[in-house]
């Protein structure tokens, strides 16, 4: 089955740039999506179609994708950005199989 | 703004069938979009379960496919999940979501708040 791989944790100081990666064999052909999940809350979409930002998401959140790796970048991370982040994509089988990465715990302190 | 709300029993016995309903407000599910289910075991990551179009086309996670049934009731603006032969491993927060279609797949765009289902005797 298709898998997306993320680092378990990333840690930065406030104001620094945080980068979270997501690797998957189908990413050259499929979009990556990123979700933020704060403790006890439902996930929120922060990046769609590799690099687009939904309305209401701060500009410090950006996304990119190259080859088999997608990257979520938080420029000037804030304490309130501390959360779990999940990438999402679909496999290349044509069967609309959604897949989440294992998640990355971002610590900002 | 579309809103989604999950409902159903919070406790299910092993080997029985888990049944959840998602009620959608602010948008008619018969117009467009896919409508999906995602789950999250306590303290663990997200798992995509499956999705359905208002016409009835469904797609589901191969690892769960034999146990999953997703259906839609456009008259009630609801869609439902049934997961059969549950075990403790199916204990999770279950989320429903509106899934937007980008051509060769879908992605969860708007989420419900989630409902915890515990499998235990």
Image: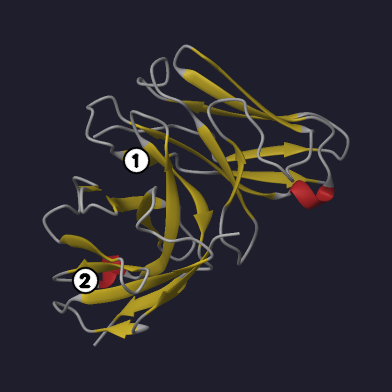
**Which of the 4 quarters of the picture holds residue B72?**
bottom left
Residue at image position (50%, 19%) is A69
Q: Which mark is residue A67?
A: none
Decide: is B36 above or below A50. Answer: below
Q: In the rendered view, tell whether residue A94 sits above or below residue B90.
A: above
Q: Residue at x 73, y 49 (%)?
A: A82
Residue B39 position in % (x across, y down): 39, 60
Q: Give the camera-side residue of B114 and A25.
A: B114
Q: Is residue B82 above or below residue A17?
A: below
Which image quarter: residue A40? bottom right
Tell me the SS state at disc 2: loop
Counting from the top left corner in percent of width and height, residue A39 is at 64, 62
Tell which subunit mark 2 falls on. B
Q: Position of residue A63 (x, y in %)?
A: 63, 26
Which residue carries the number 2 mark? B87
Q: How many marks?
A: 2
Residue at (73, 42) in percent of width and height = A57
Nearest to viewer (mark 1 / mark 2):
1
Q: Residue at x 78, y 40 (%)?
A: A58
Q: Residue furthest right?
A: A15
Q: Give neighbour class at mark 2: few <14, some 14-19, many 20+ (Cα, 10 Å).
A: some
Where's residue A28, x and y in %?
42, 15
Q: Quadrant of the N terminus of chain A?
A: top left
Label 1 environment density (alpha carbons within 10 Å; few <14, some 14–19, many ≥20):
many
Q: CA distance from mark 1 to mark 2?
A: 23 Å
Q: Are marks 1 and 2 in contact (CB under 8 Å)?
A: no
Q: What residue occupies the far top of the structure in this picture?
A: A67
Numbered mark located on residue A98 in the image: 1
Secondary structure under tag 1 reads: strand
Judge left or right: residue A27 versus residue A13.
Answer: left
> In the figure, residue B23 lies in which quadrant?
bottom left
């Amino acid at each position: 089955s298709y898998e997306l791989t993320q680092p378990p944790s990333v840690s930065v100081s406030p104001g620094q740039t945080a980068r979270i990666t997501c690797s998957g064999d189908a990413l050259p052909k499929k979009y990556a999506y990123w979700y933020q999940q704060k403790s006890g809350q439902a996930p929120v979409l922060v990046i769609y179609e590799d690099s687009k930002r939904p309305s209401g998401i701060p500009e410090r959140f950006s996304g990119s994708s190259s080859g088999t790796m997608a990257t979520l970048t938080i420029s000037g991370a804030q304490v309130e950005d501390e959360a779990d982040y999940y990438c999402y994509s679909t496999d290349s089988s044509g069967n609309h199989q959604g897949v989440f990465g294992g998640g990355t715990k971002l610590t900002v302190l | 703004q579309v809103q989604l709300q999950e409902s159903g029993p919070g406790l299910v016995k092993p080997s029985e069938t888990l049944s959840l309903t998602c009620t959608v407000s602010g948008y008619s599910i018969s117009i467009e979009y896919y409508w999906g289910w995602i789950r999250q075991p306590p303290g663990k990551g997200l798992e995509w379960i499956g999705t359905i179009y208002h016409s009835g086309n469904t797609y589901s996670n191969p690892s769960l496919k034999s146990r999953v049934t997703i259906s839609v009731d456009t008259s009630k603006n609801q869609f439902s999940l049934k997961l059969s032969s549950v075990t403790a491993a199916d204990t999770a927060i279950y989320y429903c979501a509106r899934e937007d279609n980008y051509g060769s797949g879908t992605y969860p765009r708007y989420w419900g708040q989630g409902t915890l289902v515990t499998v235990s005797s």
